[in-house]
Image (cartoon, rainbow, N blue to C red):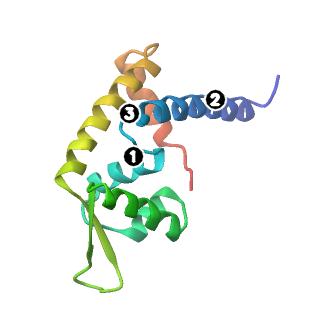
């Protein structure tokens, strides 16, 4: 039998690929990319976050974050302001439209998540979350 770690890693990758495909399909109706959706949801949890925090969360270049934020700003979903503490720092917040869209994204994600997790009862879902939370991705 193959090493257990290798089998687990491949299973996680398979599940991840499936989730990405489902997510991308669902996001098309909102006119968003996966990165834009994750950006909005991160900003919702960290209102007024510096752009550098987005860069770290998404694990992308500063230019990529600037482009994503720029597109969301053009759509009126986020606002960008200069930090009162440091004029070199730009903070990002959700607009009212951005907040409404986040609520819609969470509703759609809950439906997708329920579909993916349909074979697990509530207790197993809680256990899965606890186990996944223990995995250190650096």
Quarter of the picture containing the C terminus is bottom right
Q: Residue furthest right?
A: 1
Question: Of circles 1 and 3, which is in front?
Answer: 3
Q: Secondary structure at mark 1?
A: helix
Residue drawn at (30%, 86%) of the image: 87
Q: Which residue is mark 1?
A: 37
Pinpoint residue 8: horizontal percent, then vertical percent.
66, 31
Q: Residues within 10 Å of mark 2 (few under 14, many from 20)?
A: few
Q: Secondary structure at mark 3?
A: loop
- In the picture shown, does residue 95 fall above or below 118? below
Q: Residues within 10 Å of mark 3 (few under 14, many from 20)?
A: few
Q: CA distance from mark 2 to mark 3?
A: 24 Å
Pinpoint residue 48: horizontal percent, then vertical percent.
25, 66
Pinpoint residue 61: horizontal percent, then vertical percent.
55, 67
Q: CA distance from mark 1 to mark 2?
A: 21 Å
Residue drawn at (46%, 42%) of the image: 133
Q: Which residue is mark 2?
A: 14
Q: Residue furthest front?
A: 74
Question: Of circles 1 and 2, which is in front?
Answer: 1
Residue drawn at (39%, 46%) of the image: 37
- In the picture shown, does residue 72 fall above or below 134? below
Q: Nearer the viewer, residue 98 or 28?
A: 28
Q: Which residue is mark 3?
A: 29
Position of residue 85 in the picture relative to residue 63 (left or right):
left
Q: CA distance from mark 1 to mark 3?
A: 12 Å
Question: Of circles 2 and 3, which is in front?
Answer: 3
Residue drawn at (39%, 58%) of the image: 71
Which quarter of the figure has residue 115? Answer: top left
Q: Residues within 10 Å of mark 1 (few under 14, many from 20)?
A: many
Q: Nearer the viewer, residue 66 or 116?
A: 66
């Amino acid at each position: 039998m193959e090493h257990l770690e290798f089998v687990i890693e491949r299973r996680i990758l398979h599940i991840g690929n499936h989730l990405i495909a489902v997510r991308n399909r669902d996001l098309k109706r909102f006119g968003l990319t996966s990165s834009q959706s994750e950006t909005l949801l991160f900003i919702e949890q960290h209102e007024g976050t510096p752009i550098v925090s987005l860069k770290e969360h998404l694990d992308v270049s500063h230019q990529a974050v600037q482009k994503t934020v720029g597109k969301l700003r053009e759509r009126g979903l986020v606002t960008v302001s200069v930090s009162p503490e440091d004029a070199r720092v730009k903070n990002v917040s959700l607009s009212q439209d951005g907040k409404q869209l986040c609520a819609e994204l969470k509703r759609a994600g809950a439906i997708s998540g329920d579909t993916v997790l349909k074979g697990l009862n509530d207790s197993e879902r809680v256990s899965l979350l606890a186990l996944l939370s223990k995995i250190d991705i650096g």
